Structure formats: structure tokens, C-alpha cells
Image (cartoon, helix red, strand yellow):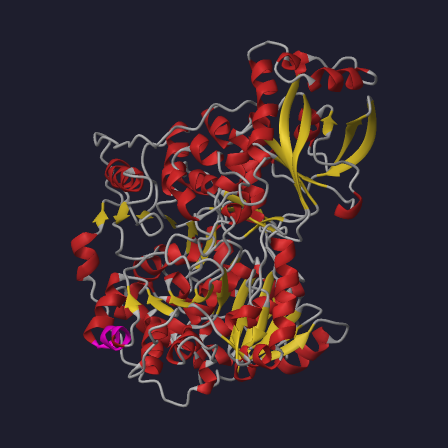
Amino acid sequence: MKLYNNGVYLINGTEIIEDGADAIAAIRQKTGKETERASAAGATISYGILESHNTSGNMDSLQIKFDKLTSHDITYVGIIQTARASGLEQFPIPYVLTNCHNSLCAVGGTINEDDHMFGLSCARRYGGIYVPPHQAVIHQYAREMLAEGGRMILGSDSHTRYGALGTMAMGEGGPELVKQLLGRTYDIDMPGVVAVYLKGRPSHGVGPQDIALAIIGEVFDNGYVKNKVMEFVGPGVAELSVDYRIGIDVMTTETTCLSSIWQTDDKVKEFYELHGRGLGYKELAPGDVAYYDGMIEIDLGEIRPMIAMPFHPSNTYTIAELKDNLMDILDDVEKRAAVSLDGAVDFTLKDKVRDGRLYVDQGIIAGCAGGGFENITDAADILRGTSIGPDEFTLSVYPASTPIYMELVKNGSVADLMETGAIVKTAFCGPCFGAGDTPGNNGFSIRHSTRNFPNREGSKLQNGQIASVALMDARSIAATAANKGFLTGADEWDGSFSKPAYHFDGRIYANRVFDASGKADPEAELVFGPNIKDWPAMSALPENLILKIVSEIHDPVTTTDELIPSGETSSFRSNPLGLAEFTLSRKDPAYVGRAKEVQKAQKAIEADTCPGSVLEEVHGVMEAIHTRFPEIRRHNIGIGSTIFAVKPGDGSAREQAASCQKVLGGWANIAEEYATKRYRSNLINWGMLPLITRDGHEKLPFANGDYILLPGIRDEIASGAADITAYVIKDGGLNEIELHMDALTPAEREIILKGCLINYYRD
């Protein structure tokens, strides 16, 4: 795999010329035409799709309107509640509400199914599409029924990726969907576009997850594609089935890219025709001369079966490399775990080594990444006639949709799997976020799913539990299962794959999916369960702001799972205050109590009483402030909490990672950088300041428990200031520091000034 250091010109989709002093002359020699970089940049597939959806008239500053929206049952209640509070009357474009995350309705009593009934009633009232539980995971339904060539889809799940079908899709926090529901736009600067140039064909036993993990391992740490669009091109694309392309594409989220798109061909056309939507196909390819901001060149034949060890998809090795250096790599995993787990529990995988081989306790093939038809039929081929054994090892398989499940039943794959001792279950995303198949304490699970963050498998660190996940391809998971739990790469299996044909039966959806798209019924009543709560009132940004640091996190990356846990907490995502009780519970259990103490002072200000009467230390803070700013008084301040994290926001698009801080009185994050654009956008949409410090985290000028003054912050935000003078309040004095803010759009500045997106639209 090669990462180019400079921009790259792609000639006729096959010839690569790296940008440099002689590049234009080389292009002239090959094409006989004069080429400018700007015009070549406009010849990418990405540019064409973004241009056709941009409403600003300026391709440097995009204002995008999407064609369709999609959400699942963890996110759609909050989105619709926010939109209702902001004036929603009907869904202006097709909006699909799937139910694939909170499908298990025993957790929390009735509240999960209450959310589902709310979703169904919203589909009736506002004109949407409702997909009942167990019918399909969100992204498989979108692939089968929603994607179209040259179109754009926005989803409230980070793995909203349909690029293999020619659809540019993005996963964002709920407020960005609210903007689309209210007829507004998705505002970003024109992103960079990085070509992923594929050549060759995959070796025997190598699956899409192997290719994906190889890419993630190369580009995550160096940020090569961060907030950019990955455009898959080159002759190698034609060597991959559509299912295979989809399996690579969905994992591009883990690179921190903004979106993805692929060149299309007759295989994609056949996919659309197979699903009864032939008109959805569009041929997409870069122009004769296309310029990319970078390129990842991959010889597919060089990739070998991969494994991403705990606790991140970028912690990658070939399975052969792991076997050859087993104890050294397990030692490295322990060192990484000590950072990720803060030493809260002892963690080792060395006790999984038996006779020099690594034994795993569980295998899972599931969700939007693993649950595809081809992944499961290939796994069934490897497992046919074997047994997973009667010991600790278990294997669960979750087809990504009921149509896939039905075809697997018809062609015998389900019988082949069940005969081995594997369990085949319905479409459900639980194994991806810790709500299904949680291993035993100290268990080690291999999964063809999307993530392997700490506790992502369902264990609870705060209760002294620990289990861990390694990501692998379905084929290697099957080979391991056939070997009764001893880690095995699929390239060690010498059989052949049967590759049965897939037949899509749309009657399943016709019989069960409620589709009122474009047919709103304003008389339909919404159905509210007792856990569905409105957002609490939120104040506008004050003239001057006092922040107390209530959590300090020095991990290299802080995931959204650590900011607000997944798993059983998902049942509370319709209840902002109830969910907020879990904020940082796996990372800093004292955070909620500290934040609430600071929030008492703000509530006192809003009630026109002295904040020091409820938070004694405020008296000393104000005395220190008055030594330099005597004009700052109770009537022109706000008091809130903040956290410091080195690089927060990797992972899920869930808005609750920010909104939970806000409803507890949070008014900012301070970071060295933000892991993803979507997390930073979530902060902004909830009225929080995405502050940056350029002091390395080893020498911060502030610490947990310190107060920081941001004088005149309202004017600073209104003016678009990039550098913000702040003061750490210490020992009765003010120590000046510099904080920074990356550029905000005019709308983003106004949202922060208003206090949140709801206030912005309400006003």
C-alpha cells in the first residue's frame, strides 16, 4: 500500500502522475491537451455530486441539501423532538426510521418499544417510512431501498456509507438532520478528495474487512483522509463484487474521512435491477484528467487476512504476523490497554494462549459490515460439515436484513451454519455497540462488525468487568470457528467458495414496512411513552463566561463511547436528563456530580440570585476576576463546566456525546484537536464552544478543578475571532492563556450565540 505525499493526477482512470514541477507537461504529452489543476479537481466523481447538491453558488463554501435521510431508534426520537421544538410540520424529503439498535425490548421495561411506537406515529403524522424491528439494520435497508447513483443521503449514524452504490452518504449528529428537516443546509468548506486506487484482485480467503482494516491501519494515525472524501477508482474495482465493495466502504468511517464514493459499473447496475430499482443506477467515473489531493494505491493481491486487536480498529496486524510474534504483540496490547482503561482493571490476553496458539471465546458476524449475503455464504462454505465444539467458544451470525435471511434459508446456508452449533439471529446492530452477545468476564471476541472500542462488546468497566474485541473478516472468523476457537486465517483454508446467486424478495418489505413518504397526516396523534422527554431550556451565550474544568482526559483519543456509553444506556436516549446521568461514567464517574455542582451556580444566575449562595467557591472566583475586570458582574456572566480531552469524538455520530454535557451545564470542550468533524459539529449545534489549546497536554496551563474566565466571549464569537484571550483563575489571581477556535460559519456562530440549534430555529 502506498500513500502519495503530494496531489495526484489520474489519466483515463488508469495512469497516475504525481503532482510536481513536471506534472502538467507529462499530462500534455499523454493527452495532447493543456490541463489546469482547478479544472482537473472538478473532474472527480466527488466534485460532480457535491456541485449538483450545493445551493450556495460557491464551491469553496458548500451549502448542501440532501436527497434523503435515515435514522435508527437510538437517534430518531431526539431528532424529531428537536425538529418539533423548532417548528417541524412535515418531512420535506424521504426520511426512513429504522429500528435496529433498541430492538431488544426487555431492557428498561417498555421504553424501547415506546420509542418504536413514537417513530411509527411520526411516520404517519409527518410522512415518513417506518421499518419495524428485526427487518433490517439501518444501512442494509438503505442499500436495498434508498440508495441511488449520484444522490446524497444524510444519516444519524456514523456508518452512513453507500459509496459503493454511487451514493455519497454522510453520518452526522442529529442536529444536522434537523436542519434538513427544516429546509436548511449542511454547511462545510469544499472537502479534500483522496483517491483510493485499486489494482489486482484479492487473494484466496481475503475478504472486504481485511482490505478495510489494512487501509485503516495505514491512515488513521496520520490523519491522511481526515474529513476528506475517499474516492475508489482503478481497475481493481471491477474485480470486486458489489457486496465486497460495500464491506470495504462501510468501514471507511473508521479512517475519520467525511464520506466515500466509488466508480460504478455493470455490477452495480445489476444490484439495482436485482432490487427492482434499475432506474436508481447511474454510471460514475472520474473525467479524463482528474486531480486528487492525495492517493492511496493498493494492490489487492498483496493484502492478507487481517486482525484489529483491542481497543481500536487501527491497531492492525496480519493474522500471520500476530501468530509469528504472538507474545510481543499481546504485550503491546496490554500497554495500550493500560492507557485506554486507565488501569481500572487488570487486562491480559496472554492467558488465551494455549500450546503457542491464541484461543478466542466468541465469534460474531453481524450488522452493516458483516451481515451481508456474500460474507455469510462464504462463512457457511468454510464451516460446512464442521463443528464449533462444545467448549467456551460460541458463534453468532446476524444477517443484515430479513430478505438476506430468507435467501440464506432457501439456499441452505442457515442449515449449514446451525448444524455446526452456530446460532443465526435476526437483523440487529447490538453486537456493534454492546447490546447483544456480551462475552463473559475476561472474554475475547472476534467480530466482523465495525468497532472494537473498550466496552463496545457490552462489559462494564465501572463494575470491574472487562472483555475485549478484535475485528476480523467473516471468512477468518469462520476458519477460526471451524478450528474450535483457535485463531485461524481464512487463507489457511484450502476449499473453494460456492458463490450462490442472490435473489431479493421485496414482498417482505411490502408486507411490513410502513411507507407514508410524502403523505403527511397532520391529524395523526403522536404516541409518547413515559421516557420520552422534551429538551430542557438552554440559555443563550452570556457576555462573559466562567468555565470550571470538571474532567481532564489525557488518552491519545477519546471515543464517543467514553463520552456517553453505548449498550444499555441506549434505552435512555429519548430522555435527555436521564441519559445525562451516564455521561463519562466509564471514564470519569465523578464527572456528573461535579458538573451538576457548577450548574447550580448558573441556575442561580438565571433565577437572579447570587451564584455564590449555592457554590461557595464562586465568591473567591469573582474576587479574583474583579482585580482586573470590575465590570464583570452577576448580570453579565454565565457559569458552566468544561472538559479537557486530547482528541475527543472518535467513533459514533451520536449527538448525545455533546448534548449530555450541555444539559448538565457544559458550555465548552477544550482539546488539542477534534477527532471528527461530526463531533465538533455536535458541540456547535448544542451551543458549546469547540475550543483548542496549543499547549501540549503534558504542560497544560490549567488542571481539573480550575476556573477559566473568557471575558467578552459573546463579542468574540460574533466577530468570528480565531484567537481568544482567557484567564486561568488561580491563587486569587488571573493567569493569561490563549485558546483558539477554528473557523465557524455565520450560522454556526449564531447557533452558539443563541445557546443551541433549538433556540436558533425557534427565534
416 in the magenta segment: yes
- Left or right, residue 234 beside residue 339: left
- Left or right, residue 755 beside residue 730: left
Q: Residue 120: x and y, percent?
A: 25, 41
Inspect this view and state whether residue 607 appears: yes
Q: Nearer the viewer, residue 189 or 123?
A: 123
Q: Quadrant of residue 680?
A: top right
Q: Is residue 699 above or below residue 6?
A: above
58 in the magenta segment: no
Q: Is residue 294 above or below residue 687?
A: below
Residue at the spot x=55%, y=41% of the render? 584
The stretch in magenta equals 411-418
Residue at the spot x=59%, y=79% of the render? 321
- Left or right, residue 442 beside residue 604: left
Residue at the spot x=65%, y=73% of the render? 328
- Left or right, residue 116 beside residue 595: left
